[in-house]
Image (cartoon, rainbow, N blue to C red):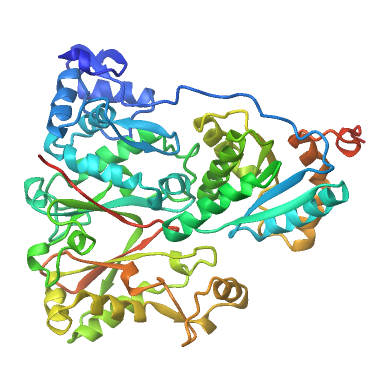
């Protein structure tokens, strides 16, 4: 028979005390803004999506810059930290992806939080399978309100023209997620 | 005494079975029985660790929470680790939080990785950390309890939970009781692993360990033959270091003491061992399909002899002597992502 003696035990868990539920500032109008895409060394599909979105953003009068995240440890990691810092200093809006695996979701949210903490309008981009992880990491990073745009999953096994079609179809919803105030973003859905 | 511990208190049964049910209901457990972390018990762990309870040992992702000496002690108590292991546990957790270890990625990844802890120094004997027969699992000693303490820290402090913050597709058997092993320094013809990495005496080296694999050889009668079979065995196409998205990787090789004797006679300098292993741990570039070859070439992984090496340099292959005196087998552990191993001193005084 087990003993039923009661006593006091201590909580082994830790929790983060603060949380920002705000999604941060909207982009507003696109014309004249510098939009920064954070891409990576993992997902060619994300390169293809950002190619399309960059083309559209340029048509709307924005300037587009890219920064590719490589290895995040060792000497290359040191270089990446410096490059990310310089990149975030050079843009008005941060579009950070792609959260399409466990570790890349972690780094996507990490970099998005870095951008958001500077006050930049920021959006992280994830595929649907990693939505929960992205939200969890944002909340645990102290910003549950971080904007998140979802792409379908699986994405990386699709052909380039299929991914381009997805990017074109999602461009308007991407603008709305980002808080863009222009005719295309605010056009009623048909 | 009780006021130096600041954690929230719960009144509950102290019976192990009943407490385990209680802890599981709060998400604290790993499915194995848990020792109730009473104030008196936790105090013993804090005292043994020689740290103030509120001292922050590390900030651990994904929760980015403060792993204080007290919180780590509570988890060590629940795991049933010996109090005397607290300095080792603190050192291992602190090492895992170094940026180059990439714990943020490691704890979230789809990969099947767990931080392994390789132990050097007198503490191997004091804490009964296995370095001989059966060291990877099954040997007597406290390694599973120490490893479990570290795993509970990852769960309860770092916030690593399968399905929410960890996307590991398969997990890893060592995600329950960790992987804590010693090096058989007394049987090694080379300096201890930690000493070669700049830390003498009691030390831990943490390493991002994917699943372990065995190498068996019953024919080799020379150092070169053994190193060739070990090195070639490291090089399989799906290994972390051959991924077109991995900029670099490490590899960990355990050599049993019988093989170490033979290899050490031919190669008294460990760098020569690493060089031979590195040369063999490679694949011809033509063995990769074009869609793999192109990104690997872009990363600069192809050497002038048209081979792609698992690791960028011979120094990235970590070698340790451990295992039973039955010989015949070596043990290999591939690394994960661009996680770089970290060696830290363990301060017992």
Q: Position of residue A94 (x, y in %)?
A: 67, 43
Q: Position of residue A101 (x, y in %)?
A: 55, 50
The quarter holding residue A74 reads bottom left
Q: Position of residue A68 (x, y in %)?
A: 61, 57
Q: Is residue A97 visible?
A: no
* Residue for point 89% across, 34% down: A189
Q: For the C terminus of chain B, give its image quadrant.
A: top left
Q: Is residue B347 above or below residue A158?
A: above
Q: Position of residue A152 (x, y in %)?
A: 70, 47
* Residue for point 40% across, 56% down: B339
The quarter holding residue B176 reads top left
* Residue for point 48% across, 49% down: B109
* Residue for point 18% across, 81% down: B267
Q: For the N terminus of chain B, give its image quadrant.
A: top left
Q: Is residue B318 above or below residue B122?
A: below
The quarter holding residue B239 reads bottom left
**Residue in front for this viewpoint, A179 or B146:** A179
């Amino acid at each position: 028979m087990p003993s039923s003696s009661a006593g006091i035990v201590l909580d082994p868990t830790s929790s983060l005390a603060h949380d920002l539920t705000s999604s941060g500032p909207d982009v507003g109008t696109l014309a004249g803004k510098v939009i920064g895409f954070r891409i990576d060394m993992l997902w060619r599909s994300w390169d293809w999506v950002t190619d399309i979105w960059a083309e559209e953003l340029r048509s709307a009068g924005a300037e587009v810059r890219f920064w590719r995240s490589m290895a995040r440890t060792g000497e290359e990691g040191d270089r990446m930290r410096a490059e990310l810092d310089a990149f975030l200093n050079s843009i008005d809006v941060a579009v950070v992806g792609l959260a399409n695996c466990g570790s890349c979701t972690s780094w996507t949210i990490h970099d998005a939080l870095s951008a958001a903490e500077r006050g930049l309008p920021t959006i992280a981009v994830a595929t649907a399978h990693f939505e929960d992880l992205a939200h969890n990491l944002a909340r645990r990073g102290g910003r549950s309100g971080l904007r998140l745009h979802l792409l379908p999953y699986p994405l990386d096994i699709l052909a380039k023209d299929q991914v381009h079609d997805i990017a074109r179809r999602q461009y308007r919803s991407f603008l709305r997620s980002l808080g863009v105030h222009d005719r295309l973003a605010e056009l009623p859905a048909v | 005494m009780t006021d130096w511990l600041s954690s929230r208190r719960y009144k509950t049964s102290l019976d192990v079975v009943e407490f385990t049910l209680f802890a599981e209901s709060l998400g604290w457990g790993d499915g194995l029985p848990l020792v109730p972390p009473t104030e008196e018990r936790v105090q013993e762990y804090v005292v043994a660790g020689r740290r103030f309870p509120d001292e922050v040992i590390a900030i651990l992702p994904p929760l980015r929470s403060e792993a204080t000496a007290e919180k780590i002690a509570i988890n060590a108590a629940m795991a049933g680790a010996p109090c005397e292991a607290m300095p080792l546990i603190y050192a291992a957790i602190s090492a895992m939080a170094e940026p180059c270890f990439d714990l943020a990625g490691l704890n979230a990844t789809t990969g099947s990785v767990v931080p392994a802890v390789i132990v050097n120094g007198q503490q191997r004997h004091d804490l009964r950390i296995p370095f001989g027969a059966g060291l990877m699992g099954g040997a007597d000693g406290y390694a599973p309890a120490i490893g479990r303490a570290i795993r509970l820290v990852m769960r309860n402090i770092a916030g690593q939970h399968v399905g929410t913050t960890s996307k590991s597709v398969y997990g890893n058997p060592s995600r329950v009781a960790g992987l804590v092993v010693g090096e058989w320094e007394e049987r090694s013809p080379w300096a201890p692993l930690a000493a070669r990495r700049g830390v003498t005496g009691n030390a831990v080296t943490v390493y991002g360990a994917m699943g372990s694999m065995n190498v068996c050889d019953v024919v080799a009668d020379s150092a070169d033959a053994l190193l060739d079979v070990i090195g070639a065995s490291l090089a399989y196409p799906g290994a972390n270091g051959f991924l077109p998205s991995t900029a670099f990787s490490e590899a960990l090789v355990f050599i049993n003491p019988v093989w170490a004797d033979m290899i050490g006679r031919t190669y008294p300098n460990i760098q020569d061992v690493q060089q031979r292993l590195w040369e063999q741990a490679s694949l011809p570039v033509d063995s990769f399909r074009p869609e793999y070859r192109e990104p690997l070439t872009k990363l600069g992984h192809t050497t002038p002899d048209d081979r792609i090496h698992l690791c960028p340099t011979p120094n990235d292959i970590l070698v340790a002597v451990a295992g039973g005196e039955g010989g015949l087998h070596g043990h290999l552990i591939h690394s994960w992502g661009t996680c770089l191993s970290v060696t830290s001193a363990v301060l017992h005084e």
